[in-house]
Image (tube, grey):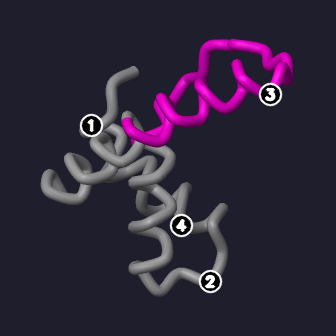
Amino acid sequence: MNNLDAVCVDVCQTFCLAWRKHLISSGIKQRNNPFCLSVSEVMTIMITFHQSGYRDSKIYYIHFVCRYLTTNFLT
């Protein structure tokens, strides 16, 4: 899990910088509201969901993320 999380953090840092440059150059105004989860945490949850075999993301979140992954994420 730590390797996947490290990859997600690296990808998200690169993507977020490119996305901010695009928004600045295109003139699109975006709100900068703080999120409870970082982009890398959401990406980690989505990747593990697709690898898990669960069919419903709500059930996956309740039964797996809330039980096992919340200790890995900062709150």
Q: In terms of image quadrants, where is residue 1? A: bottom left
Q: Amino acid at mark 1?
A: Thr
- Say whether disc 4 or disc 1 marks the residue closer to the N-terminus: 4
Determine the CA span between mark 4 and mark 3: 37 Å
Foreground: disc 1 or disc 3: 3
Q: Amino acid at mark 3?
A: Ser
Residue marked by disc 2: 55
Q: Amino acid at mark 4?
A: Tyr
Give residue 67's position: percent from left, percent from top. 37, 51
Q: Amino acid at mark 2?
A: Arg
Q: In the rendered view, does 55 fall on the left or right side of 74?
A: right
Q: For mark 3, does the 10 Å Cα neighbourhood hold few (<14), some (14 to 19), or many (20 or more) residues? A: few
Q: Is residue 8 magenta?
A: no
- Say whether disc 4 or disc 3 marks the residue closer to the N-terminus: 3
Residue marked by disc 1: 71
Q: Which residues are magenta?
A: 14-40
Residue marked by disc 3: 26
Give residue 52's position: percent from left, percent from top. 41, 79
Determine the CA span between mark 4 and mark 1: 16 Å
- Say whether disc 1 or disc 2 marks the residue closer to the N-terminus: 2
Q: In the rendered view, does 8 fall on the left or right side of 62?
A: left
Determine the CA span between mark 1 and mark 3: 38 Å
Determine the CA span between mark 1 and mark 2: 24 Å
Q: For mark 2, give the secondary structure.
A: loop
Q: Residue at x 48, y 41 (%)?
A: 15
